[in-house]
Image (tube, grey):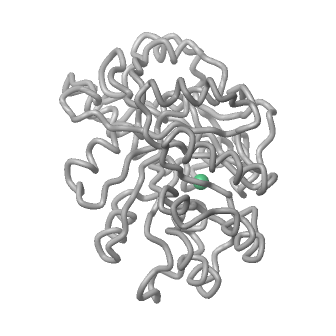
Amino acid sequence: MLYPISQIGAVATTEPRSGALLKMEWPDKKVGYADIFPWPEFGDADIDTQLLALARGRISFLVEQAIWLGRKDAIMRSMGVNGLHGGTKIKNHFLITDFTTIADRHIADIKNAGFTTVKIKCGRNIHLEALFIQKLINQFALMVRVDFNSRLDFSNFQRFMGFFSQRDISKIEYIEDPFPYDTANWTEASKLVPLAVDFEYENVDWSHIKSPPFKVIIIKPSRMDVDRAIGRCTTFNLKYSVTSSLDHPVGIVHAAIVAGELRKNYGTYFLDSGCLSLRAYKSTEFNNKILVQGPYITQVTGLGIGFDDVLEGQDWQLLTR
Ligand code: MG
């Protein structure tokens, strides 16, 4: 269970979120770990269904990604390396899931900690949200990423954009999933501000599209085939931002390691990441193993994705039919 500190998304509630850690052992004796934290609010099967299916040999796309990540972890562990060592540090945005809980002094703290970009979940009250974004931009000189989780429609979106001056808009790096994907309206919307696809990625007709009406792909290693997504970035000249899926610290470190690898190989398309979502939930014993400095996840104790002793100490149950 992960316990949200405040409302964590426009759709989600403050209810505890259910997920699972997976420990995987391969025939070559390598052992690796990953997490699954489904979002039933966005159409994922819940965790019990996922695990039951897995026990019967049916693999959902979340489990498929967990296996891919677990294998990466297993290889790093067997080589005796720590996934965050040696790479360049990846800068993250500060995530605001519920702006009503953020006072001005908090924003000053965020700025002083070294964050230059804030991502804000929106879609509950666009007027108040626009005012808050203007404050971030004008009073605190922060860049802003906005995520609507497809809560708007095109006319609400136009209304939202109408609150901003041209100068404000130049400080909005992108708007993610403003409303459900359709090429015509997204094309119109993209004339006002750069757009990014996250959940709507699945609704894009990739095989027929010539010139996508968005500039950025949100890459969530726990939810999507990373190589395919990077291929789309290079084909269509799109940027990407690697983010956690607001999941367990295990998934956060996995995402941070993938971000570092992608930046090394596909640096031209790289934008700052969004892996630092530790503050969204009450702290667990895993959090103490992660060292965070301002916008950077700098260290994790252990091999691979880290957390060695904490992972070993979990009450593992064999997945059986
Ligand atoms: Mg999103």
- Quarter residue 247 falls in: top right
Q: Residue at x 69, y 41 (%)?
A: 47
| Above/below status of 300 relative to 32 | above
Q: Which of the pair 289/22 is nearer the observer?
A: 289
Q: Residue at x 36, y 63 (%)?
A: 239
Where is 158 relative to 149, above or below? below
Q: Is residue 167 above or below residue 272?
A: below
Going 69% across and 72% down the picture, which residue do you hit?
A: 180
Q: Residue at x 46, y 86 (%)?
A: 209
Q: Is residue 84 left or right of residue 150?
A: left
The answer to whether 76 appears left or right of 229 in the picture is left
Rendered-image quarter of ligand 1: bottom right
- Quarter of the figure with the N terminus: top right
Whether residue 45 is visible, yes or no, is no
Q: Which one is nearer the viewer's eye here, 228 or 291?
A: 291
Q: Position of residue 85 (x, y in %)?
A: 23, 26
**Image coords of residue 216 (percent x, y):** 44, 64
Q: Is residue 180 visible?
A: yes
Which quadrant holds the C terminus? top right
Q: Nearer the viewer, residue 45 or 128?
A: 128
Left or right: 288, with 102 as reference point:
left
The spot of residue 52 in percent (x, y) is 68, 43
Give left or right: position of 270 versus 53: left
